[in-house]
Image (cartoon, grey):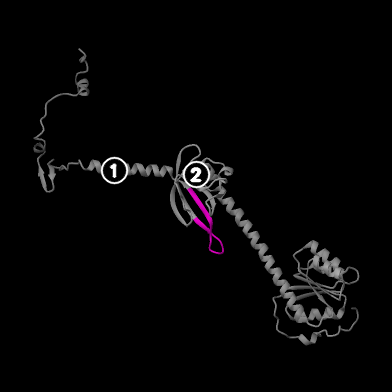
């Protein structure tokens, strides 16, 4: 492996100068004690837009790794001072997400297995006859690493969003709950528990039909409507629900998330207002229009008569009410 001459079939640096740069600039650490391979790989991948850091042994490779931001590592296995297996162990302990590729001579089967266990994404044997194949391997490994990093970032974002969602739902005044596609409770905040009188543990063992006054409910669409909830201790509550259906990637209904607002007082006021309007309509039927100036009374549309004629069919007699008697004759004893 040592020596000043390139291996048989190795592409020389001059063969790929000034070629089109095909990859986004990344940092590549190349660790190999063979100078010709190290130079060939360095020139090839610099020409492809990489920032390349070459190292002639494992220890220098680790020094570079900890001093620089490295995106991918190419390493030989058999090297002086620190071999490739030890390099991979150290890098893997520091950051198991760093992609590594082994480029080595025909090694023992246990070395290959050991390298793969240490995090190697691929194993390329020498002599190197096709640099395009190595480039393709690196592209594949970097893409896999990118997708894995995006997936981790996405999961972290989901966890943060869920944490923010739970923080918000636990602190708002309205009740919030979720149901599965069968109507079973899967989540409820403390406000909904206070509203209904049930504990979270109790509600999560129930179906919406267990605490709703209606015989049947079909909360499957994004909608707003009113239902009656059975309070644990004090009868019925009138509740306004704002519901949003939960749909999976296959456009299949999976449940619902709902915001519940206690509108019992509003419903009571609404009913009192309806009664008031009904009373007003009843009283209006007995209203007699009277002129504010001459006091004439309208008996039918377009016909007015004097007030004394309106009452001419009613016979009056004189008398005095008890309250007036007490006011006019305070010293008189009416019991005698």
Nearer-N-terminus badge (2/1): 2
Q: What element carries label 1?
A: helix
Magenta span main SS = strand
Residue extending farthest top:
336
Residue 28 versus residue 9 in the image, above or below: above
> Which quarter shows the C terminus?
top left
Which residue is more in the foreground, 315 or 25? 315
Q: Quarter-wise, where is residue 304 in the image? A: top left
Residue 81 rendering spot, x and y as whole percentages: 91, 69
> Is residue 213 a member of the stretch shown in magenta?
no
Residue highlighted by disc 2: 211
Specify whether residue 324 is in view: yes
Which residue is more in the foreground, 293 or 188? 188
Residue 54 rendering spot, x and y as whole percentages: 82, 75
Task: Locate residue 263 relative to residue 311 in the image: left or right.
Answer: right
Residue visible at 24% across and 42% down in the picture: 282
Residue visible at 32% across and 44% down in the picture: 274
Which residue is more in the foreground, 93 or 210? 210
- Label 2 vs label 1: CA separation? 33 Å
- Rate crowding at label 1 as few (under 14), some (14 to 19) or many (20 or more) other CA atoms within 10 Å: few
* Front label number (2 vs 1): 2
Residue visible at 83% across and 84% down in the picture: 10
Task: Locate residue 232 relative to residue 122 in the image: left or right.
Answer: left
> Which quarter shows the N terminus?
bottom right
> Is residue 248 a member of the stretch shown in magenta?
yes
| Highlighted magenta segment, given as a residue range | 244-260
Residue 70 rendering spot, x and y as whole percentages: 76, 69
Specify whether residue 174 is in view: no
Residue 160 rendering spot, x and y as whole percentages: 63, 56
Question: How many numbered discs?
Answer: 2
Residue highlighted by disc 1: 278
């Amino acid at each position: 492996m040592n020596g000043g001459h390139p291996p048989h079939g190795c592409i020389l640096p001059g063969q790929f100068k000034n070629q089109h740069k095909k990859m986004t600039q990344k940092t590549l650490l190349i660790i190999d004690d063979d100078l010709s391979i190290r130079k060939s790989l360095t020139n090839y991948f610099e020409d492809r837009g990489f920032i390349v850091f070459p190292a002639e042994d494992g220890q220098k490779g680790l020094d570079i790794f900890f001093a620089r931001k490295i995106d991918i590592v190419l390493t030989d296995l058999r090297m002086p001072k620190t071999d490739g297996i030890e390099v991979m162990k150290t890098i893997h302990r520091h950051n198991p997400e760093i992609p590594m590729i082994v480029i080595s001579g025909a090694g023992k089967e246990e070395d290959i297995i050991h390298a793969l266990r240490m995090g190697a994404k691929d194993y390329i044997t020498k002599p190197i006859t096709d640099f395009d194949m190595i480039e393709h391997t690196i592209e594949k490994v970097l893409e896999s690493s990118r997708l894995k990093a995006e997936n981790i970032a996405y999961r972290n974002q989901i966890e943060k969003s869920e944490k923010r969602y739970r923080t918000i739902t636990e602190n708002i005044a309205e009740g919030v709950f979720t149901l599965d596609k069968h109507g079973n409770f899967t989540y409820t905040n403390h406000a909904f528990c206070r509203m209904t009188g049930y504990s979270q543990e109790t509600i999560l063992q129930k179906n919406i039909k267990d605490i709703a006054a209606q015989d049947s409910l079909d909360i499957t669409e994004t909608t707003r409507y009113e239902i009656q909830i059975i309070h644990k201790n004090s009868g019925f509550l009138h509740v306004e629900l704002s519901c949003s259906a939960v749909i999976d990637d296959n456009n299949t209904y999976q449940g619902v998330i709902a915001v519940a607002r206690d509108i019992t007082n509003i419903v009571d006021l609404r009913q009192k207002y309806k009664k008031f309007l009904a009373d007003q309509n009843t009283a209006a039927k007995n209203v007699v229009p009277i002129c504010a100036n001459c006091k004439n009374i309208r008996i039918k549309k377009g016909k007015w008569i004097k007030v004394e004629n309106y009452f001419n069919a009613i016979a009056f007699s004189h008398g005095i009410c008890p309250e007036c008697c007490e006011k006019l004759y305070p010293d008189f004893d009416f019991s005698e």
